[in-house]
Amino acid sequence: METNKIAILIKKISLEFDKMSNPFFLKYNLSASQYKVLKYLYDQSSETARVVDIEKYYSMTHPTTLGLLDELEKSGYTTRVDNPNDKRGKLVALTDKAKNMRLELVKLGDDIENKLIEPLTCEEKQELAKLLSKLIKE
């Protein structure tokens, strides 16, 4: 049964990325979802972020985000540090392990994404990114 429902197609492609990438990230003791959190932190100039910012960026619930962060801490990729701007809050920070693996992990994530979108032409890739960004109002 085929569908043309956009929300279902978007969910399916997200699941396809996870399915494709999980075997590759397993070598690093990471899931695709954990990698996405690391990628978010890699993209921050300070390599730290508030938990709420990660939640908002990925539209995740607080318990889901905390679960991912707990696993990343257990694996030695992140730690939580005091937020100098908010005494009640913590920041998620990359560990030296995560920083040292940055280039390798980002390249792996990019390679997986490129494999996923390989059937598209360059113009189609640009148009897809433009349309999806428009849907999420970026």
Image (cartoon, rainbow, N blue to C red):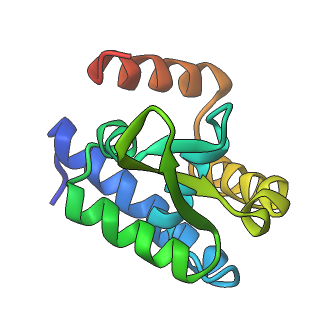
Considering depth in this image, is 60 or 52 the residue closer to the camera? 52
Q: Within the image, what quadrant is residue 137 found in? A: top left
The percent coordinates of residue 50 (x first, y second) are 42, 43
Q: Is residue 4 visible?
A: no
Is residue 138 toward the left or the right of residue 32 in the image?
A: left
* Residue 21 quadrant: bottom right
Q: Is residue 12 visible?
A: yes
**Which image quarter holds the N terminus?**
bottom left
Identified at 37% across, 37% down, the residue is 57
Location of the C terminus by quadrant is top left
Q: Is residue 80 above or below residue 58?
A: below
41, above or below 79, in the image: above
Q: Residue at x 64, y 37 (%)?
A: 43
Judging depth in this view, the residue of 111 and 31 nearest the camera is 31
* Left-right relation of 58 to 3: right
- State the residue at coordinates (54%, 24%): 124
Q: Is residue 19 above or below residue 4?
A: below
Give the percent coordinates (x, y) of residue 73. 53, 74
Q: Which x, y percent locates residue 59?
A: 26, 43
Please count the marks in the image. Answer: 0
In the image, 114 versus 47, the foreground residue is 47
Q: Nearer the viewer, residue 25 or 55?
A: 55
User: Residue 104: image x %, image y %?
Assistant: 82, 60
Residue visible at 46% across and 78% down in the picture? 71
Please state if 51 lies on the left or on the right of 118 as rendered.
left
Name the residue furthest front: 87
